[in-house]
Amino acid sequence: MLGMRADTPLYECIEDGKPCVKTENDVIAKEAVWEQEKGVESFKEESSYLRVIEQSKKNCKGKNFQIGKMLQSFHDSMTTDNEILLQHYLEGWRELIKFMDSMGSVFTFISHETTTKINILQGYLDGENGNSYKTIKSMIKYELENEVVNFKYLPSNRVPSGCRTLLRMHRALKWLEVFLYEVGSSPGQGRTSEMCADAYHKTLSHYHSWFIRQIAEVAFLAMPPLEEMYKLICVQDHNEAKVVLLTTVDSIVKVYNITQDLYTINNMLDLP
C-alpha cells in the first residue's frame, strides 16, 4: 500500500482505485497556513467546527439539504475514544443522499442503493440486538462472535450482515469525500463533472461492473456547474465554499479512517 506524507493531497493516496489503509486525518496539510485576509480560519480547533456548523445551518435554513446538518452528524458520530456511533453515521448519510438527489439524476444509481443499505442498518439498530449495533466496533464484534458475517459468499436467503452493508457505504463515502475535497480545494474553476468523474475513477469505480461504470460516465456529464454547487451548500463564492467543504471533508476523513482501521484489523475489506 502506498503511504501518505503530511504534504500529500488526500486524493493522491490511492492505489489501484483503493484508498490507503492509513491516511492523514487532517485534510489540510499540517504545515499549511491559510491566509487570514481571505477569511479562512484553521479547522484544528473544536470551536472552528462549531462555527462552521452553525453558520451553515443559518445560511441553509429552510432548505431540504443542509450541509451543516451533514457536517454535524459525522462530527457527532465520533466519540472521545475514537468509536463511531452508527445512528449518527446513518444520519450523516441521509443528508448525503439529500445532497446527491439535489444535483438531479446524476447520483440516482448510488443514492437508491444507499437508501436500501441505510434501512438495513437502521433495522439492525432498532432490532432486538440493537445495543450490539450502537457503534461500528460493537457491530463488528457482535457479528463476528455470532458468525453473522460470511467471508466467502453472500447468502441469498437472508438480509446482508451489517458489516457487509456498511462496507459498501464506506467505499462510496470515500468517493464522495474525494469529490467534495476536489471541489473545495479547486481555485473556483474547473468542471464539477470532471472532478466527480476523477474521484469516481480513483475510488468507487473499481468495485463496480462495466455496465454501472458506463452509466456513471454518462451521468457525470449532467453535473451542475460550480456556481450551482455553491448555491446548494449555501455559500456566495469559492472562499466560503472552501471553508464549508473542507471542514466537512475533514470530519468525513476522520470517520472514514476509524472505520477503515476496524475493517483492516478484522480482515473485512473484501467481504463478498
Image: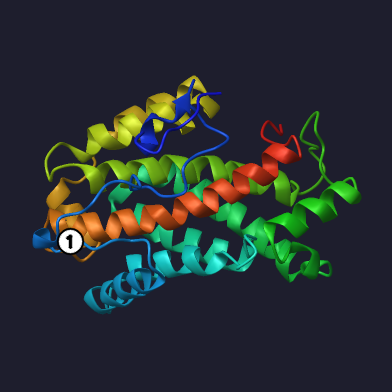
State the image quarter where residue 217 is shown: top left
**Which quadrant is home to the N terminus?**
top right
Q: Taking 56 as reference, is 180 above or below it?
A: above
Inspect the image, locate mark 1, and give the three-letter code of the amino acid beneath it.
Glu
Q: Residue furthest front?
A: 31
Q: Is residue 65 visible?
A: no
Query: Of helix, strand and loop, which one carries label 1?
Result: helix
Q: Residue at x 34, y 65 (%)?
A: 67
Is residue 211 or residue 93 the one in the foreground?
A: 93
Residue at the location (38% across, 29% down)?
A: 12
Q: Vertically, is 227 above or below 204?
A: below
Q: Disc 1 designates what residue?
A: 240
Please tell me which residue lies in front, 150 or 134: 134
Question: Can you say which quadrant of the picture contains the C terminus?
Answer: top right
- For image coordinates 32% across by 45% down, the residue present is 181
Q: Is residue 178 left or right of residue 228?
A: right
